[in-house]
Image: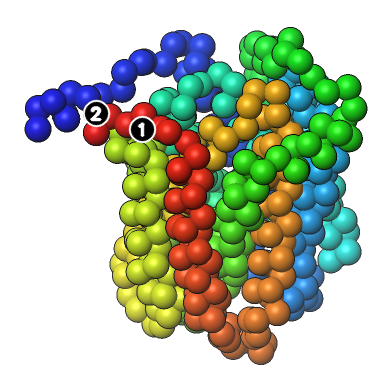
Amino acid sequence: MTKASKSSKPRVAFSGYQKFVIAVLAFLQFTVILDFMIISPLGAMMMPALQINPHQFGLAVSAYAFSAGISGFLAAGFADRFDRKRLLLFFYCGFMLGTLFCALSTTYHMLLLARIVTGLFGGVVGSVVMAIATDLFPLEMRGRVMGIISTAFAASQVLGIPAGLFFATHWDWHMAFFAILAVAVPVGVVIALRMKPVADHIALKQERSAFMHLLHTLSEPRYRLAFILTMLLPTGGYMLMPFGTTYLVSNVGLTYDVLPLVYLITGLFAVFIGPLVGKASDSFGKFRVFCFGTAVTLVMVPAWTQLGHVPLAVVIIVNVVLFAGIFSRMIPSQALISAIPEPTKRGAFNAIGASLQQFAGGVSAAVAGLVLTQVPGGPLEHFDWIGYIVMSVALLSVLLMYLVHKQVPEKTAS
């Protein structure tokens, strides 16, 4: 017991610069994730303001995902030919421009176009972040790295979503996007001034043709399982989250005033859960933690999608445990999949993976929009059907993750 306890301690501590890089990447992810997540709590306000139905709103969510998927494929061939820092800044600037267009949108079609522009750039940012994290940190440390970076997801709830709802309820939904810009611009400046180039991969042997680089990455047999799994993992988020606020208001009976409290408490717990899951992934095995997260998810998804009129405390507890399950799947899967590509293909691999994920997410959101129906002033119908789909995909992902796990001889502390 003593030996296991000692071996579970991190073998290598982060250097000062490594801590800086992790913090910057996490903060950058916070702004990008918030831009997507803010759509969910604003959905209940945007639909009546723009006079659109759940299907149209689902398309607005999907527009970001589909455009991000296209840009990922277009960028994949060039992703390993440039300094990753410069690539990151280019796409991050484009993301901020798209967010500005969202803030200025006054009609549904303007919003749709703005989401397309935002997705073209924002969808690639995450893949560059993953490539940088993989380049700078060995597999034995990546669970902790992914755990910390994933706190951006939680922070977007703790700070971003309640703040976005505050701006939206006191002014209108446009102000939420202006608030994202107020945070995103300083992050870009810090990256430009203080982050070192990430260009060691350029010195390695590169393919001359960007198209052939893309083609060879796509056709690499070792990558196929990882690509399929990457498409399945975001299904739950894209199906459930865009309609979460509408569901809580229309079906569970919560008011807009208490919604920030739900997101705030859930996010606070997730801020602590993320790093703990990352440490557990490095200590006990990433596949084991993923299986644990899937088991929790399979229990909590039907509980969430069939809540009914319950007290606020019950809603918060169910939400917290559900997100604990989601984090316990997301963090170890990212760390494990990051070990698949070699250095000269990490950029292309992550760009293609992000594209496939966005396409799958776009299809998921669109399908959810088709499955769900709502009469004016009434509840969302068939929300439990979405839960059954998410559970089926989660079970399939365990099998695929096992096959990926067999390809990666990870070192664990236990």
Q: Is residue 137 left or right of residue 322?
A: right
Residue drawn at (40%, 78%) of the image: 307
Element under disc 2:
loop
* Contact, mark 1 vs mark 2 (Cβ under 8 Å): no
- In the picture, the quarter occupied by the N terminus is top left
Element under disc 1:
helix
Task: Name the amino acid type tagged 2.
Answer: Ser
Where is residue 85, by image quadrant?
top right
Q: Is residue 91 left or right of residue 395?
A: right
Task: Name the amino acid type tagged 1.
Answer: Asp
Decide if residue 398 is in sight here: yes
**Vertical placement of 396 versus 356: above or below?**
below
* Disc on the earlier residue, 1 or 2: 2
Label 1 environment density (alpha carbons within 10 Å; few <14, some 14–19, many ≥20)? many
Q: Which residue is mark 2?
A: 8
Q: Nearer the viewer, residue 261 or 344?
A: 344
